[in-house]
Amino acid sequence: MPELPEVEVVRRGLQQHAAGRTIASVEVLHPRAVRRHLAGAGDFASAVSGGVISGARRRGKYLWLPIGDDAVLAHLGMSGQLLIGDAGRELSSHVRARFTFTDQGPDLRFTDQRTFGHLSFARGGADLPGAIAHIAPDPLEPSFDLAALITRIRARKTGIKRALLDQSLVSGIGNIYADESLWRAGLHWARPSETLTRSQLETLFAAVNDVFNEALGAGGTSFDSLYVNVNGQSGYFERSLAVYGREGQPCRRCGAPVRRDPFMNRSSYSCPVCQPRPRRARW
């Protein structure tokens, strides 16, 4: 699933290519694309048409396009793409919704091969859609409060990776970037959160920011053709991954074989030397 850097790459593209434009029409081509908009596809199209997109915003893995006091809220799911291109180009069978603009310029298409992503109209949601108000700020947001987050993490009795993935604590960190950040900080993913010092957590979140910013510079991580920016281009941060997806390959720091462990129906990757397993692990 696309994580914060991949979604932020898309947000920046929408800010550049969609902000300031007036929506002429919306065509919903698959009802699952707007399944979270309970009033249905027709109501969604009617609510959005004629609106002026004032920008593109993001919290964690959610995107929204403010339109007046309201917003179009999007989640890309496993394979969703928001693509800007020539309005006359061929319509792919995976396009689920299409937005045209009054300037008759490039259109915006929501393409989703696996149909796990979704769009909805958030009335009054220009600043923050109500549907995602419960999600904690992510590390790149101005409202992110590291000191408060550290206090909350140290009060939990859980493994540190579980804490990183808990969107009620901090949003935007998924499996890939959790593993990469923990490797940089020298922390095993099952280290009990309550045993970590403030200094160790400050080091960890400095690593999170470094990993995010490096991934953004590379256009995100693209394991297949589904993870692309608004122009359909893939990112290349995969080439810089230190542990994620590298089972058995040498650690880039010490040379020990990277280890893979099962974790929450997924996998965790770590270096057994740089990230020693704690005696009292929390899985």
Image: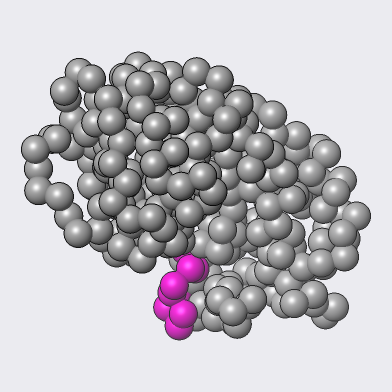
Residue 149 seen by the camera: yes
* Residue 215 covered by magenta stretch: no
* Residue 240 covered by magenta stretch: yes
Could you tell me which residue is drawn at 71 percent across and 65 percent down?
162
The residue stretch that appears in magenta: 239-250
Which quadrant of the figure has residue 94? bottom left
Q: Position of residue 54 (x, y in %)?
A: 43, 19
Could you tell me which residue is drawn at 33 percent across and 55 percent down?
30
How many discs mark residues in the rendered view?
0
Could you tell me which residue is drawn at 72 percent across and 44 percent down?
134
Q: Nearer the viewer, residue 58 or 243?
A: 58
Q: Position of residue 176 (x, y in %)?
A: 51, 62
Kindly report the secondary structure that dominates the magenta region of the rendered protein.
Answer: loop
Residue 8 seen by the camera: no
Classify 88 as above or below 263.
above
Q: Is residue 208 left or right of residue 89?
A: right
Classify 281 as above or below 58.
below
Q: Is residue 268 left or right of residue 251?
A: right
Q: Nearer the viewer, residue 42 or 73?
A: 42
**In the rendered image, which quarter contains the C terminus?**
bottom right
Which quadrant of the figure has residue 229? top left
Q: How was the colour assigned to the protein in this rendering?
A: one colour
Tell which residue pokes out farthest to the right in this image.
155
Q: Is residue 193 left or right of residue 51?
A: right
Q: Nearer the viewer, residue 86 or 154?
A: 86
Q: Position of residue 138 (x, y in %)?
A: 63, 41
Q: Is residue 80 left or right of residue 205?
A: left
Q: Position of residue 170 (x, y in %)?
A: 69, 47
Q: Nearer the viewer, residue 216 or 80?
A: 80
Could you tell me which residue is drawn at 70 percent across and 74 percent down?
276
